[in-house]
Image (cartoon, rainbow, N blue to C red):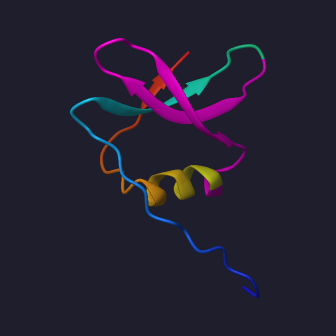
Amino acid sequence: MLFKRKIEKKTYDPGIKEPAIRTSICTGEKVAGFCNLTSGRFEEVMLINSEKDLQEFIDTYSITGKIRKIY
């Protein structure tokens, strides 16, 4: 690969936020972000167009385990 994008590591508090993918039933659009555990509010981080984008989200935030899907 000629140009490889460097992934900047970011953090989140797993005691407050849970990683989630919000998926539209009508259009199939996927957005990665975090769901606040107390309020249930979803915070968008990035649009997911491919598996590569999903892997970038996982690598950026060092997510381990299963990611919740919200419809």
Task: Residue 40 in the image: state x and y as whole percent.
Answer: 39, 13
Task: Residue 14 in the image: state x and y as whole percent.
Answer: 26, 38
Identify the residue at image location x=35%, y=11%.
39
Rendered image quadrant of residue 25: top right
Front position in the image: 35 or 66: 35
The part of the chain drawn in magenta is 27-52
Classify the position of the C terminus by image quarter: top right
Identify the residue at image location x=36%, y=52%.
11
How many discs appear? Answer: 0
Rendered image quadrant of residue 59: bottom left
**Residue 23 lies in magenta, yes or no?**
no
Identify the residue at image location x=48%, y=26%.
69
Rendered image quadrant of residue 45: top right
Front position in the image: 68 or 12: 12
Front position in the image: 4 or 50: 4
Identify the residue at image location x=69%, y=49%.
50
Left or right of 29? Residue 70 is left
* Vertical comparison of 51 with 70: above or below: below
Task: Residue 52 in the image: state x and y as whole percent.
Answer: 63, 58
Left or right of 10? Residue 54 is right
Left or right of 47? Residue 10 is left
* Vertical comparison of 17 with 46: above or below: above
Task: Residue 1 in the image: state x and y as whole percent.
Answer: 72, 85
Residue furthest left in the image: 15
